[in-house]
Amino acid sequence: MAWRWERAAIAALLVCVAAPAAAIDKDAVAKLGFGDSDEKIAAMGALVKEGDPRAIEVLKALADGNLQTAGERVFIQRDDDVLDAVTGEKVESPPEDRDDVVANNRIRAAVGDALAGLRILSPERAKRLAAAKELTGGADPAMLPLLQRALAAEKDPEIRSLLEVATAAMELKTGDKAQRLAAIRRLGASTSPASRTMLAAAANAPDADPEVRAEATKGLAAVEGRLAWGERLGLAFAGVSLGSILLLAALGLAITYGLMGVINMAHGELIMIGAYTTYVVQNLFRAWAPGAFDWYVLAAVPASFAVSAAVGMLLERLVIRWLYGRPLETLLATWGISLVLIQTVRTIFGAQNVQVENPAFMSGGVQALSNLVLPWNRIVIIFFAAAVLVAMGLLLSRTRLGLFVRGVTQNRAMASCVGVPTARVDTYAFGLGSGIAGLAGCALSQLGNVGPDLGQGYIVDSFMVVVFGGVGQLAGTVYAALTLGFANKLLEDWSGAVIAKIAVLVFIIIFIQRRPQGMFALKGRAVEA
């Protein structure tokens, strides 16, 4: 419960700051109960300046609507008990006619800053770091003495850096000219994105001192130069991340369309089946093995491959086998099957999206730079895509099935003459492509909600990747996926997501007109024939 957490925080802060056992500021508490908004905010500043950790409970009660008044006294409603807000002692016979103290949005925002200011003295690093991050966004200048006190005692470099930005921001608002110049210089040496905002405000203030404005402009240029590297690296990571997702989505299609020549419009639904298989495995682990829940992904990967591969092989046996060499009929048949699969999933799981939870090791991210966080789920998916690519390359180049697939692709008649079971190879190859689509669905389930229309968003992109890279070329699929991923993210940064999609599609159309064989032309008997 929230109150249990607050009581633990209060006890820890009492040890940290060695606050006296006497009651907190009675006048400040009275203003919190009976004053107007300005008086309440001033009272918060007084409590924060005093530094008494028991003020956390009073401020939290105000924000949660548990602060009450009766006569000239202020009380805290805690579960079934009523406490005196000043002394913290339980009131045995509280008045019945207590009124709730109402806090508006302005008061709640001020309470958040005040609580962050008090928690900055916590002995736990995680709480101090969270409080420091809150305060860098702006805080009441009344907390400056408390932050200076915390800064003097802080040893952690990351928290010290955040506290220096927060104290400099306060001095920039309230200090004299010398203090403001010193604060601007400290902000100019920072790598925090919050520094850029504050320096920009100081540089563009029309009534500021010319020397202060000049120093702020100089500091702003220095901060923007450092932050630009984080933005560039973030854009590059986003491009690789999107490229890996496109690669996973297109690898299966590189077999079914690139190697077998089948225009499979149900490929997106095979991706969707892999995502729903991951959802089912997650629920099974949650119900039957909650202690091993964080490892459900290890079971979901082979399960999503197997289920999608089985559906794909069934699709090839029942429908596609009879339509080889008839692309229009294949396109229409697989499009109809895609609608059937979507409706089947809606009937089983419902039309609403379902949520697949990230395991613990894929939650959060790596703080690479002050303005760059690399999410663990995308990092894992990048390596997962690379592993799938390597496994697929080894399978096609080093195994008997891969030899048969390549032989049937280059010359089906000759392969059949030398004893290759071409019909069985077709089924296995289509199952392999469908299984890889299921792996793509498993990966996509870790990035967002899973719904019946999940695959619809990737079918066009998958075809673009395969055609752009060169039909039948695995290396071309890799280059095309990364190229389109980077192009999408670069254009999104300049013009927005919609314009980026249109621009990429126009580029692909023009490129295919000029070079129909794609980036890498297919070589072998199939071309000569």
Image (tube, rainbow, N blue to C red):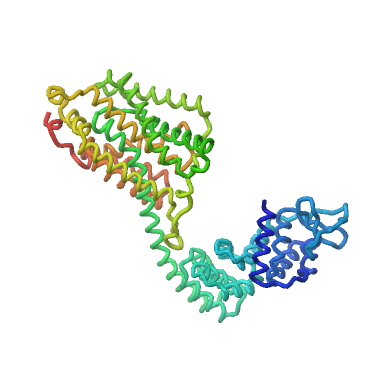
The quarter holding residue 272 reads top left
* Closer-to-camera residue (100/159): 159
Q: Is residue 207 visible?
A: no
Residue 142 vertical position relative to residue 349 in the rendered view, above or below: below
* Closer-to-camera residue (215/107): 107
Q: Residue at x 88, y 60 (%)?
A: 71
Spot occupied by residue 245 in the image (x, y as percentages of width and height) = 37, 43
- Residue found at the very far bottom of the displayed protein: 178
Residue 10 vertical position relative to residue 213 in the rendered view, above or below: above
Is the C terminus in the top left, top right, bottom left or bottom right quadrant?
top left
Q: Is residue 30 left or right of residue 430?
A: right
The quarter holding residue 129 reads bottom right
Residue 119 vertical position relative to residue 253 in the rendered view, above or below: below
Q: Residue at x 42, y 38 (%)?
A: 299
Q: How many marks?
A: 0
Q: Is residue 249 left or right of residue 360?
A: left
* Closer-to-camera residue (311/11): 11
* Closer-to-camera residue (257/312): 312
Spot occupied by residue 36 in the image (x, y as percentages of width and height) = 77, 62
Spot occupied by residue 226 in the image (x, y as percentages of width and height) = 41, 67
Q: Is residue 286 visible?
A: yes
Spot occupied by residue 286 in the image (x, y as percentages of width and height) = 52, 38
